[in-house]
Image: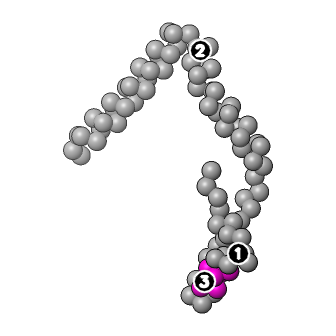
Amino acid sequence: MAEKRLKRPRDPISLAKLIGDIATGQVKDGAEDGKDPSAIAKGRAGGLLGGKKRAETLPSKRRIEIAKKAATARWAKKSAAKEPS
């Protein structure tokens, strides 16, 4: 996950001072996003499993219905883009 940075000041002199402070290690260039890293990891792990588990538990007839509906939606979108109004 990308780390948030400190907000950069618009004033060039203040920006130069901040960059100098970051370069010398006086200021850490990172802002706390307030999220618990363990909760983020747990949510990601569940998300990675979700699609596979769902595919295993769905009956093949239902998976075919879902696939047909998705294909119809894709083709409808493509044909609508090609038709001149």
**Kind of residue at disc 3:** Leu
Q: Residue at x 39, y 30 (%)?
A: 73
Above/below status of 34 relative to 6: above
Which type of secondary structure does the marked residue at label 3 adopt? helix
Q: Which residues are magenta?
A: 15-21
The residue at 62%/31% (across/down) is 48
Can you identify the residue that label 1 sits on? 25
**In the figure, 55 relative to 4: above or below?**
above
- Residue wearing tag 3: 15
The answer to whether any part of residue 11 appears in the image is no
Tag 2: amino acid: Glu
Q: Quadrant of residue 40?
A: top right
At x 34% / y 36%, what residue is drawn? 77
Task: Estimate the spatial distance between the alpha carbons at disc 1 and disc 2, rounded to whole Å.
Answer: 51 Å
> Given this view, does label 1 or label 2 mark the residue nearer the observer?
1
Lower sequence index among marks 2 and 3: 3
Residue 56 disc label: 2
Q: Earlier in the sequence, mark 1 or mark 3?
A: 3
Mark 2: few, some, or many residues within 10 Å (few <14, many ≥20)?
few
Q: Is residue 19 magenta?
A: yes
Secondary element under disc 2, as helix, strand or loop, is: helix
Badge 2 vs badge 3, beta-carbon distance below 8 Å? no
Of residues 14 and 57, which is closer to you in this image?
14
Q: What type is the residue that disc 1 sits on?
A: Gly
How crowded is the residue under tag 3: few (<14 C-alpha within 10 Å), some, or many (20+)?
Answer: some
Considering every residue shown, the one lying at the far front of the view is 24
